[in-house]
Image (cartoon, rainbow, N blue to C red):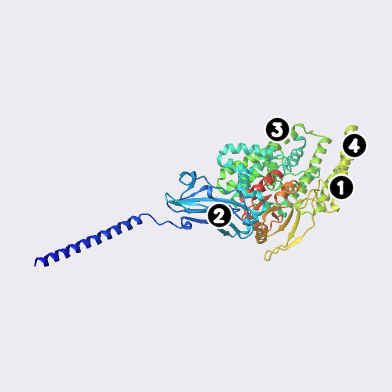
Amino acid sequence: MKTSIHSFFLAFLSFVVIGISTTTSQAAQIDLNSLLGEEEELLRVDDAFVLQAEILDNTVLVKFEIAEGYYMYRERFGFKSDNATLGEPLIPDGKEKDDPYLGLTEVYYNFIEIAVPFSDSSNPMTLSIDFQGCAEDRLCYPPTTREVVLEVPASTLALANSSGESATGEKDASNKKSFVSEQQSLMDDLEQKGVFWNFFKFILIGLGLTFTPCVFPMIPIISGIIAGQGKDITTRKAFGLALSYTQAMAIVYTIFGVLVALAGQSLSGYLQSPAFVIGAAIVFVLLSLSMFGFYELQLPAGLQAKLAEKSNSQKTGSYIGSAIMGAISALIVSPCVTVPLIAILLIIAQTGDILLGAVSLYGLGIGMGIPLIIIAVTEGRFLPKAGNWMNAIKAAFGVAMLAVALYLIKHLLPNSIYMYGWALLALIPGYYLFRNQQPNLGWRNLFAGLGLVLMIYGALLVIGGAQGNRNLLQPLGQSYSMMTTEYSQDAEGPAQAKPQSTLTGSSKPHLQFERIKTLSQLEQRVAEANAQGKTVMLDFFAEWCASCYEFEALVFTDPAVHAALNNTVLLQADVTAYDPQDVELMNAFKVLGLPSILFFDLEGNELTQYRANGFEKAEVFKRRIEAAFGL
């Protein structure tokens, strides 16, 4: 019995020992697995450092998403391509690290983006990227190379291939930052400065416009008003007449400008329509005939009596008549667009601040009128009051009135008729001066000489008109008409080129434009240019726009401007007729006046911040082009 019990006890003890041993072994195994589970499994290199690459303009953006607990070395990045020229990579500064493998170095955690400029690329572009990274406090991966294949957009391809210099990516940005147009500067001042500060500033700007096409045509008008007063003129009355003229001009100028800005479109085209300009020209012809003594312009007797206390007379020199002439001058005689005017109109249109815009416009009008007041007062002070001298001066201003009438309708006349009109204005006064009967021999010879010069000039104008020329300064040269390729005006179908052989009056090469008429033609040509990797410049032109001719003669013949537009398609929209197609085209781009020159990038988008409004010198225009196109 003892033996059986003893045997059972030994068997039980052995079972317990074996069980304990097994449990202990399992526990040890569990603890080991738990211990190994605390150390995360190492990621594959492409999972630890996730690579992405994309093209932006002429730059490849290389991005790495870096996993938690991993880092990349700055000095291990490298880039090369078999079918593109790479610029210096722009690698941001990293975080300093005392690395057990490389010592003190720069590393990146979480994310890194590197810009790699390129040029002279073919499509698709291949880029090899070298890099190396490590798992924190564990191990480093071997140096790794990955190759990406990128599809380069056509516009980017043209930009990258247009100039090796742009591969740095820095020149584009510096050019865009360095160019601030006069218009933008004035708009900044308008927004930042007070109303009264802008009022006085724009008075000074208006003074600076004295001898521009905005003011110059009004000088013979105000002079004619003063001369038309005859022997009754005094310095005080000359000042009053000039003040009436300039105040009406400034007020109408202000009202008209605000309406244009609020309407968001140019109204100059309507005011330059045949009905308006022919009516205004007739007014000036009638005024000129009164200057020649054919009749005196006056109001009906009843109305004249009622207004007698407010005006000393009701002929050309009356205060009311002077104010009416000022209003006409603001609307029709001065249809030009200047940079200050466009800046004010844009501020009104963009901010809705009518008070600021109106006060600034009024200041601009006042400034433009100050020289006219000075001229009028000087004329009233020194003008002879009676006699043959007075009659001769009135006749001279009668000729000036006819010149203003011809100036107003110039865009309605064929070249030959236009030249013949100016020829008559030179030949007839020239003959009068040549046959003068001044008792003083010195004066007689002087006037005879001037008359002879005028008659010779008139004869040259006749010859130039017979040749079809239009340039008053070079009547025997070739006319200042644009070199263009005319496009068909079928609004429904595609634009089709019809070459023209018009030449410029300058010996310098002239920009050659392609003429478009409709918005659909413009969109077609811009798309075609972009497909060829070219930018686009669009010139809005009209024959009644004096500053447009300044661009033509002084800017579009400049070699530096030609070079800047080497990779640009030149388009021109002639909106002289101001028909519905012209209105649609101008409204599409919110063109408020002429001249306006627009730039389109390689994606077909207008670069509105670089739009040129009003005349500017060739050097400024060249810098505008370079900034717009990143040259």
Q: Which mark is residue 129?
A: 2
Q: Which mark is residue 437?
A: 4
Which residue was labeled with disc 3?
236
Q: Is residue 418 above or below residue 365?
A: below
Secondary structure under tag 2 reads strand
Q: Give the amino acid type for the residue marked by disc 4 in the picture.
A: Gln
Residue neighbourhood size for the residue with mark 2, other residues' Cα within 10 Å, grouped as few (<14), some (14–19), many (≥20): some
Q: Position of residue 620 (x, y in %)?
A: 68, 44
Give the CA separation, mark 4 to mark 1.
Answer: 26 Å
In this rendering, the label closer to the viewer, 4 or 1: 1
Quarter assignment of residue 623 = top right
Secondary structure under tag 4 reads loop
User: Is there CB contact under 8 Å for labels 4 and 2?
Assistant: no
Secondary structure under tag 1 reads helix
Is residue 164 or residue 94 the one in the foreground? 94
Q: Give the amino acid type for the residue marked by disc 1 in the picture.
A: Leu
Q: Position of residue 120 (x, y in %)?
A: 65, 54
Instruction: Name the residue at 19% across, 63% down.
Output: 14
Give the CA separation, mark 1 to mark 2.
Answer: 73 Å
- First reached walking from the N terminus: tag 2 or tag 3: 2
Which residue was labeled with disc 1?
460
In this rendering, the label closer to the viewer, 2 or 3: 2
Judge from the rendering whether residue 520 lies leftward or rightward of residue 401; answer left or right. Answer: left
Give the CA separation, mark 4 to mark 2.
Answer: 94 Å
User: Is there CB contact under 8 Å for labels 2 and 3?
Assistant: no
Residue neighbourhood size for the residue with mark 1, other residues' Cα within 10 Å, grouped as few (<14), some (14–19), many (≥20): some
Secondary structure under tag 3 reads helix
In this rendering, the label closer to the viewer, 3 or 1: 1
Is residue 93 or residue 543 the one in the foreground? 93
Q: Position of residue 496 (x, y in %)?
A: 72, 63
- First reached walking from the N terminus: tag 3 or tag 1: 3
In this rendering, the label closer to the viewer, 1 or 2: 2
